[in-house]
Image (cartoon, grey):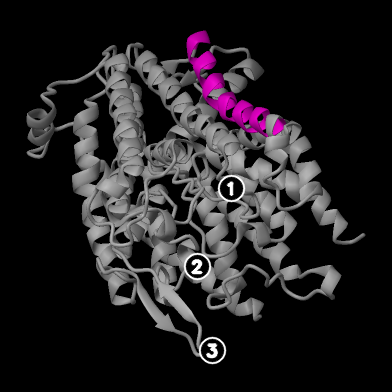
């Protein structure tokens, strides 16, 4: 494998991705501007909702919509044998798997304990999962915009309207982009049809069944909405999902397109562009650091085999560089799709992917969710800075007091509790240990990775873990649900508190929430909190596994 070309491809991708940022961020800030738009009437007519909402009304509408989505999707999955577009006559899913899948897609996670082509009908994929791929991403945008309005508001409880945000995000951003990406993917050979599966004879004379279906449209929105998952069980390593080098490049670009632009759009909507640029820079430093370290680890080779590359589980059509790039990007942006086996990464690269999810959705993260995830750390940063100088902390002209700190701590620590607590239960129970494909540190990594992925609403997995069991379906369902809404609700509560506060004029003693000093403090707080929380678990998993390579 040529490491020069691996690195060159990664550099080319990063250059293209970062060039798109200013244009997409302008599009986002225009879409969610406070002025009324014609499309808002659609939400008013369909939902009957008019005017702004305070944080409780906004949160209530959000939770009602998502809980209804879980119920509807659960019914579709369990009753798919009685629904149309099921040429293979696939049966309905058992309750525990259907519940896990429904919660997974509603929470923008797309954790898959099943293989798509052998489990789900076209109807379930299109109308069930496809719908949630759009609206779950739009919900993330809505929460980000509500937070920005809370920061910009001056003693008002108005955070906007959830239904309007949902409509704008879906119709003005996600649908147009998904249509464009679908056409590009179809041009590269990604299948898009409603045919029954095709039986063919291989060169060896054996019979093989080739799955068919409307894959391109689902792949487009799974990437653009940072949903992840896959139409086929092999995900984007399947040649029908990802047939060419260009389709691979376009799919990875789709993963980062909206998350990269979100922090800059957030700064524009919150009335402080410099703060948005600082968030963007902190996220960029974390992403580039993780990518560089992972590439270094992979390209060092495996000492057990004399430094030969870690090729097992990689997609050799694209090379190690693009496999590592995808693995880093998918765990940084809370996407979860893969084009290679995450379990086959070198121990340190796998550990970096896991740590990115453990930090929460803060390294660009899912659409919208990366911004409000890092915002929680920003609140902690200004609080710590205030303690160091003996001054009441302020954030973008709003005084930060005990209620704001409590909500920020809940949002930061709840996913950590879910990851470590659920992993502890799994490794102490017989039902949890039965699903492991490996013993020792890699087996622990399988469990840690699964719950990090669920609580961080990522969706990727270390493939050795057999997660389609009642134990893991139920445990992961809880982590999925509370990992999503246990962060969203504190963020909306914070937005409501900030919206009602009086804006304070800047003074010589104001600590600015932008610039190199604030960015360095924010980066340090995120890494220190993550290290103190997860380093012992990481030592027992990927770090010990790395040291065993040199035993």
> What quarter of the picture does the N terminus occupy?
bottom right
For the point 63% across and 16% down, the residue is 387
Q: Secondary structure at mark 1?
A: helix
Q: Main secondary structure of the magenta part?
A: helix
Image coordinates of residue 100 in percent, x first then y, are 46, 38
Can residue 475 be found in the magenta stretch?
Answer: no
Upstream in the sequence, badge 3 or badge 2?
3
- From the viewer's perspective, is the residue at label 3 or at label 2 nearer? 3
Tell me the residue that label 3 is attached to.
204
Tell me the residue that label 1 is attached to.
286
Upstream in the sequence, badge 1 or badge 3?
3
The total of numbered circles placed on residues is 3
Front-most of 132 and 550? 132
Q: Are marks 1 and 3 in contact (CB under 8 Å)?
A: no
Tell me the residue that label 2 is attached to.
237
In the depicted structure, whether residue 42 falls above or below residue 257: above
Drawn side of residue 178 relative to residue 328, left or right = left
Image coordinates of residue 164 in percent, x first then y, are 19, 32
In the depicted structure, whether residue 53 falls above or below residue 30: above
| Disc 3 from disc 2: Cα separation | 23 Å
Q: What span is colored magenta in the figure?
A: 401-424
Q: Is residue 270 visible?
A: no
């Amino acid at each position: 494998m040529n490491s020069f070309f691996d690195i060159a491809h990664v550099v080319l991708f990063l250059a293209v991705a970062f060039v798109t940022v200013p244009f997409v961020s302008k599009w986002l800030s225009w879409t969610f501007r406070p002025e009324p738009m014609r499309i808002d009437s659609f939400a008013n007519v369909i939902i009957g909702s008019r005017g702004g909402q305070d944080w409780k009304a906004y949160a209530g509408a959000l939770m009602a919509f998502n809980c209804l989505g879980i119920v509807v999707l659960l019914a579709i999955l369990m009753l798919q044998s009685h629904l149309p577009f099921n040429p293979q006559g696939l049966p309905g899913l058992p309750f525990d798997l259907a519940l896990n899948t429904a919660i997974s897609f509603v929470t923008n996670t797309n954790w898959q304990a099943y293989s798509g082509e052998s489990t789900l009908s076209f109807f379930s994929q299109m109308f069930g999962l496809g719908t949630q791929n759009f609206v779950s991403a739009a919900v993330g945008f809505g929460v980000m915009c509500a937070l920005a309005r809370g920061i910009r508001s001056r003693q008002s409880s108005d955070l906007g309207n959830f239904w309007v945000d949902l409509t704008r995000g879906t119709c003005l951003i996600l649908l147009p982009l998904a249509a464009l990406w679908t056409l590009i993917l179809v041009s590269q050979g990604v299948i898009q049809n409603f045919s029954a599966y095709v039986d063919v004879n291989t060169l060896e004379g054996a019979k093989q069944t080739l799955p068919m279906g409307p894959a391109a449209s689902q792949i487009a929105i799974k990437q653009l909405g940072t949903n992840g998952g896959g139409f086929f069980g092999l995900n984007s390593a399947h040649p029908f999902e990802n047939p060419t080098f260009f389709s691979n490049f376009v799919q990875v670009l789709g993963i980062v397109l909206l998350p990269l632009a979100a922090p800059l759009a957030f700064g524009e909507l919150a009335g402080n562009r410099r703060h948005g640029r600082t968030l963007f820079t902190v996220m960029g430093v974390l992403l580039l650091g993780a990518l560089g370290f992972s590439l270094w680890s992979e390209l060092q080779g495996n000492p057990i085999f004399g430094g030969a590359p870690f090729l097992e589980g990689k997609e050799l059509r694209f090379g190690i560089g693009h496999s590592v790039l995808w693995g880093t990007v998918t765990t940084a942006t809370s996407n979860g799709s893969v084009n290679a086996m995450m379990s086959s990464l070198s121990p340190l690269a796998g550990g970096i992917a896991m740590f990115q999810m453990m930090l929460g959705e803060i390294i660009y993260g899912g659409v919208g969710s990366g911004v409000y995830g890092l915002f929680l750390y920003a609140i902690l940063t200004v609080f710590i800075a205030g303690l160091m100088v003996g001054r009441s902390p302020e954030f973008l002209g709003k005084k930060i007091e005990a209620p704001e700190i409590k909500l920020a701590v809940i949002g930061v620590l709840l996913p950590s509790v879910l990851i470590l607590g659920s992993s502890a239960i799994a490794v102490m129970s017989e039902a949890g240990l039965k699903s492991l494909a490996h013993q020792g540190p890699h087996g622990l990594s399988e469990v840690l990775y699964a719950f990090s992925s669920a609580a961080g609403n990522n969706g990727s997995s270390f493939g050795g873990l057999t997660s389609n069991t009642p134990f893991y379906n139920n445990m992961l369902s809880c982590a999925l649900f509370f990992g999503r809404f246990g962060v969203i609700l504190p963020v909306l509560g914070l937005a409501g508190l900030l919206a009602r506060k009086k804006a304070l004029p800047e003074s010589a003693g104001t600590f600015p929430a932008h610039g190199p000093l604030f960015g360095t403090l924010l980066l340090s707080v995120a890494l220190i909190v993550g290290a103190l929380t997860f380093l012992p678990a990481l030592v027992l998993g990927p770090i010990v596994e790395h040291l065993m390579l040199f035993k």
